[in-house]
Image: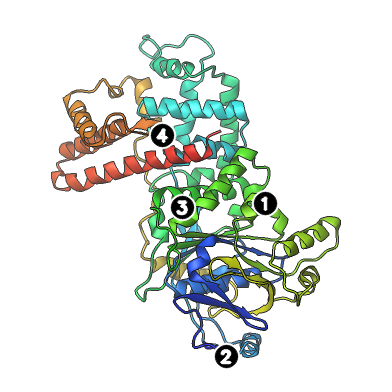
Amino acid sequence: MTVSGTTSIDTDQKIFVGKGEEPAWLTLALANRHGLVTGATGTGKTVSLQVMAEGFARAGVPVFAADIKGDLSGVAEVGEAKDFIVKRASELGLSFQPDQFTTVFWDVFGEQGHPVRATVTEMGPLLLSRMLDLNDVQEGVLNVAFRVADDNGLTLIDMKDLRALLDAIAPPDGPKKAADGNEDPLAPIRQAARTFGNVTRATVGTIQRQLLVLENQGGNQFFGEPALSLQDFMRTDRDGRGVINILAADRLLHSPRLYATFLLWMLSELFEVLPEVGDLPKPKLVFFFDEAHLLFDDAPKVLMDKIEQVVRLIRSKGVGVYFVTQNPLDVPDKVLGQLGNRMQHALRAFTPRDQKAVAAAANTFRPNPKLDTAQVIMELGKGEALVSFLEGNGTPAMVERVMVRPPSARIGPVTPEERKAIIDGSPLKGKYDTAVDAESAYEMIQKRIAGTAAPAPGESGGLLATIGGIAATIFGTNVKHGRLSTTQLIARNIARSVTDKVVGGAAANLGKDVAGSIGGSIGRSIVRGALGGLLRR
């Protein structure tokens, strides 16, 4: 494509979004200052999102976007030179050239893309409490459960692990003994829980019922292994273009807390795992958060403060976050102030709240003496938007009324057959498709009940003690990340790998697996510990 007065579209420095009196450019070096796309249903928000996603991909920037209606999936297929597209391009001085983009489909339920999973440990008690809508007392009991799991070496991977742990810390209805008549094998776990405060069966029962609700919404498919590696979102194709990652969210949207908490977890994970890079010539990843109001609805103040903190600080990691919602009032002022790049599609002022939304939207733009911003917002046609992008040293440009350019890829969804072919040809095919049920808290607790459990941490023999000593020498015994010390994590996981490999006779792969255990252990602990620091009350 070319546009009058320019040499090309989507250069290595900026993205052409549309044109009014002047072309509207989104500067890549300022794209990590975040953005907001708002407008009523049917006014063109999805097309604007697709135009930006294509521009970022051309510039070599990977993209992640939640696809609520399925329309965004068309970016994977070549666009068609339909009459209305050619006409729009001509009006903007463009010559339309169809294109398509390397796309990876994801789906929490594993039906319309690669499965997306996280472990219960990675999610942590605070976000899990938000997902389950727990009160303060119930959240406290969940924190106790996680602490007991760490202290007793009980790995929490999936929902049955958490259920088994909650049953283990709940006080029994009466005296309990093992099958052989000896003392209750779970008594040490219950005693450990009591050291952190009173845990009642009624509270545990309430949490279990909320877990059942989450399971019925599909949460049991989200928690498990292999867990998602966020590095798989940050890929480029063989031509150096950014890969567009699309999360199928049509079904997920029926579970709004799961949807919102999942995306917040992803943002928090990105914040923790990516290094500080400052301001880059272009972002390392751009994250589009559709139906953004779900993130903020009924969120407690402390969580709102931490969301604002993540949004404010993640730009230094090279990540741009773009919220997509109908009404600018859906986004709290503290977050709204962090969103420098704005696209406002039409709003209708039929109610007092609508009129307030129009006024609020108009007041967030840098005024243009040639425009009555509030009036124009109500007059915009489909495919038109008021645009104000950051320019120069990061100051907002004056608001302009622009006609959004047409996307180069298909407008509208892919067919089920096309989606299947893309998934089958994905470079990630097979990595996440099959769930793995490793030994974790559920199996460990069952072994204790059966009297066949391995010694608890601290009771092990020479191998574990030796590895623990080596880890302590390398990393320091006083270094802690979250609930479990680095030494405990490394010792426990290396010992498990060593034992498995020696017994299995696979010594040739020992170095690789031990390294993986170290990385996975430290990574999971750092993520949950740092996330807990961000979200701790």
- Residues at marks 3 and 2, CA–CA distance in whole angstroms: 43 Å
Disc 4 marks which amino acid? Gly
Question: For mark 4, does the 10 Å Cα neighbourhood hold few (<14), some (14 to 19), or many (20 or more) residues?
Answer: many
Q: Is residue 131 above or below residue 237?
A: above
Q: Which residue is mark 4?
A: 482
Which residue is labeled 3 in the image?
Answer: 116
Q: Amino acid at mark 2?
A: Ser
Residue 163 location, x and y as percent?
Answer: 49, 31
Indicate which disc residue 4 carries. 2
**Does residue 110 appear to the left or right of 49 in the view shown?**
left
C-beta proximity under 8 Å, tags 3 and 2: no
**Quadrant position of residue 37:** bottom right
Instruction: Tell me the residue that label 1 is attached to.
Output: 333
Label 1 crowd bin: few (<14), some (14–19), many (20+), radius 10 Å: few
Judged by depth in the image, the label closer to the viewer, 3 or 4, is: 4
Q: Are marks 2 and 1 in contact (CB under 8 Å)?
A: no
> Label 3: few (<14), some or many (≥20) within 10 Å?
many
Amino acid, disc 1: Asp
Q: CA distance from mark 1 to mark 4?
A: 31 Å
Disc 2 or 1, which lies upstream in sequence?
A: 2
Give the CA distance from mark 3 to mark 4: 24 Å
**First in sequence: mark 3 vs mark 1:** 3
Q: Are marks 4 and 2 in contact (CB under 8 Å)?
A: no
**Going from the N terminus, do you reach mark 3 or mark 2 first?**
2
Q: Neighbour class for label 2 at 10 Å: few (<14), some, many (≥20)?
A: few
Q: Report, in whole angstroms, how far the alpha carbon at label 3 lies from the one at label 1.
A: 31 Å
Q: Position of residue 483 (x, y in %)?
A: 40, 31
- Badge 4 or badge 2: first in the primary sequence: 2
Percent x, y of residue 537: 56, 33
- Upstream in the sequence, badge 3 or badge 4? 3
